[in-house]
Amino acid sequence: MKTTAGDAAIVHANVKPIAIHLKEVVLKSYARFTTRPNNHPLYPAIRKTAKRMVQRHKTALHLHAESSIVKHLEVETITATSVEH
């Protein structure tokens, strides 16, 4: 496949471009962060970074929160119930 254009080969192989794949990974990981329970060790850090964006010295959590469409403070908590037969 030396003569095949790179973009055409990616489309035919059904592979997402790396930028889109990385964006999806970031969104999924931040969604997992935001759904941690209150007693989780990372919960205070996630809540703090979601409240206020900093101008300098951004951490990975700041970058996740900035690029995410999921807002930590707007996530609804749903309590699980057990199903008994």
Image: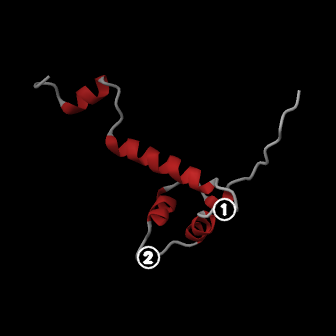
Q: Position of residue 17 (x, y in %)?
A: 33, 38
Circles 2 and 1: CB distance less than 8 Å? no
Q: Where, quadrant-wise, is the N terminus in this rendering?
A: top left
With 74 as the anchor, is 68 left or right in this view? left
With 59 as the anchor, is 1 left or right in this view? left
Q: Give the vertical position of 17 relative to 61 (above or below).
A: above
Q: Give the secondary structure at mark 2.
A: loop
* Residue holding disc 2: 55
Q: Position of residue 30 (x, y in %)?
A: 53, 54
Residue extending farthest to the left is 2
- The numbered mark at residue 18 is none
Q: Give the vertical position of 81 relative to 14 (above or below).
A: below
* Residue holding disc 1: 73
What residue do we see at 46% from left, 51% from top?
A: 26
Give the mark nearer the N terminus: 2 vs 1: 2
Q: Position of residue 32 (x, y in %)?
A: 58, 50
Q: Position of residue 55 (x, y in %)?
A: 44, 76
Q: Give the vertical position of 48 relative to 32 (above or below).
A: below
With 78 as the anchor, is 2 left or right in this view? left
Q: Quadrant of residue 4?
A: top left
Label 2 neighbour load within 10 Å: few <14, some 14-19, many 20+:
few
Residue type at the position of mark 2: Gln
Residue type at the position of mark 1: Leu
Q: Quadrant of residue 11?
A: top left
What residue do we see at 42% from left, 48% from top?
A: 23
With 80 as the anchor, is 55 left or right in this view? left
What residue do we see at 48% from left, 75% from top?
A: 54
